[in-house]
Image: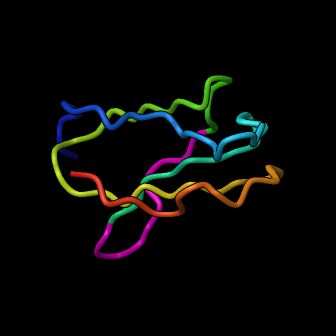
Amino acid sequence: TPAEVGVLMGTVKPAPGAKPDFASIKVSISDPKTNNILRSISLDVAGSYKFTVAPGEYMLNIVPGTSKSDQLPQRILAQ
């Protein structure tokens, strides 16, 4: 298992006027070659997420859950 040395973090910004329930939104990272989910968490109340990862490429998946907003990005390639 590689040593965990990096951080993948960010904040989901809703569309203007949208008020999503951030706690219902799941964020996961997956292997871009296999699409296997490596870790999954819920956003915090401010819409932020943070993963400690080994260096490499990851797919970031954002699943709205019960949020009514369809303005959230679904997949973002992170390095």
Q: Is 36 in the magenta?
A: yes
Left or right side of 62 for 69: right
Residue 52 is situated, as x and y percent measured from the top left of the image, at 33, 32
For the point 46% across and 63% down, the residue is 75
Left or right side of 47 for 28: left
Total residue callouts: 0
Q: Is 42 in the magenta?
A: no
Report which quarter residue 22 is drawn in. Answer: top right
Residue 36 versus residue 54 in the image, above or below:
below
For the point 39% across and 59% down, the residue is 76
For the point 28% across and 53% down, the residue is 78
Nearest the eye: 62 or 33: 62
Residue 44 is situated, as x and y percent measured from the top left of the image, at 63, 26
Q: How is the image coloured?
A: rainbow
Q: Residue furthest bottom?
A: 34
Nearest the eye: 59 or 1: 59
Q: Residue furthest top?
A: 45
Report which quarter residue 19 is drawn in. Answer: top right
Residue 26 versus residue 48 in the image, above or below:
below
Residue 29 is situated, as x and y percent measured from the top left of the image, at 43, 53
**Highlighted magenta segment, given as a residue range:** 32-41
Residue 2 is situated, as x and y percent measured from the top left of the image, at 18, 44
Nearest the eye: 14 or 29: 14
Residue 4 versus residue 57 in the image, above or below:
above
For the point 70% across and 54% down, the residue is 64
